[in-house]
Amino acid sequence: MELFLSEPPFDLDKFLTIYNSTFPPDDDGPSSAPCHVNVPGFSGLGLTITYIIVFVFSIVGNSIVVYVVCCMKQGRASTDIYLMHLAVADLLFCLTLPFWAVDVHSGWIFGNFMCKLLSGFQEASVYSGVFLLACISVDRYFAIVRATRVLSSHHLLVKVVCGVVWLVAGLLSLPVAIQRESFAAEDLGRTICFENLTGNTGDQWRVSMRILRHTMGFFLPLVVMTVCYSWTVVTLFHTRSQQKHKAMRVILAVVLAFILCWLPYNVTVLIDTLIQGGLSEVCDTRYRVEVMLNVTQVLAFMHCAVNPVLYAFIGEKFRNQLLLALYKHGLISKRLLMAYRKSSVSSVGSIRSRNTSITM
């Protein structure tokens, strides 16, 4: 749910690029004119509305996911627990969006404490989300490739793993929460929420944080997911178990959605880091990277609303479990429940099976 999206839509690094560069757009030689790389269409009312729309869809969808998993008193699989925590991480992320939406339109008006708190929440939610996806990949590897349910059936162990994930994510978010401040940027004529660091020390700190986010917060978990799911998919190709095939559909879709939403942004931030490290001083290059940063950042923000849509459209058992939960709470009739149940009596039993995931 920075430069990993822990950074609000207003980026001081980009601001420093604009005002400190000494190269004009059409000349590679030195000049006193700054690089003006403001991207039309990625500020103001339009972007504010986009963030609010993502917030609404995310909070509704992920709340439903948490509700469905909590209603599974006896049929909760290990994957369901991980997915519930993933939904909580997306909820935590999306709760910060209205504040960044206001920031885009009016600057940061919420004070220093909220700047630190929301920045820490957003950073922790992104770290926890990617760590949980890596945990799911390991869980599926042991359940399918190693054909063992020691990890997948021991709910206490799964809860401990989730607790460790949140603890590590919280610790990794502390540097950003500590350094982030609300202060007036005179050249911008507005108050911003960003790391108030200057000079070589500040530049080194930002580069170090970007490297940490790239390695711990994306590429390392991505390697874990790639290895585990590669073995899992190969194993599934050699088995005729339709149940296992169904169990992997939504999970693989969730991972694919994560890659499609986050990979472009992380690659663009990596390029931006290299440019700020002296790779290129051409304004035209900086403008193109700025356009890519704005586009891919919006795409990454949207990720927190994607997973519930995947569960609803691909996960048949999730739809059935949701309807069953609504029926138990008297929100829909039995007739409506049976009308939407597309499975046979065997699938009704599978909903109640301890080892069945809502993603099947």
Image (cartoon, grey):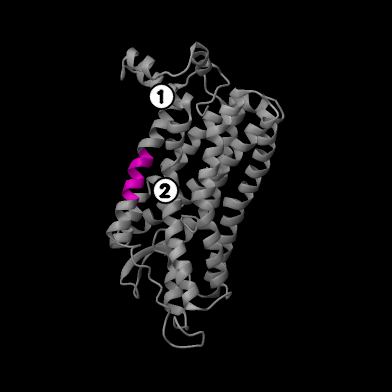
**Residue 7 visible within the image:** no
Q: Contact (CB < 8 A) between labels 2 and 1?
A: no
Label 2 neighbourhood size at 10 Å, few (<14), some (14-19), many (20+)?
many
The quarter of the displayed image where residue 110 is located: bottom left
Amino acid carrying label 2: it is: Met
| Mark sitting earlier along the chain (2/1) | 2
Label 1 neighbourhood size at 10 Å, few (<14), some (14-19), many (20+)?
many
| Region in magenta | 51-59
Q: Secondary structure at mark 2?
A: helix
Q: Position of residue 345 (x, y in %)?
A: 49, 11
Which is more toward the observer, 111 or 122? 122
Residue 302 — which label?
A: 2
Q: Is residue 58 above or below residue 213?
A: above
Q: Secondary structure at mark 1?
A: helix
Q: Position of residue 119 (x, y in %)?
A: 43, 54
From the image, tell me which residue sits under label 1: 322
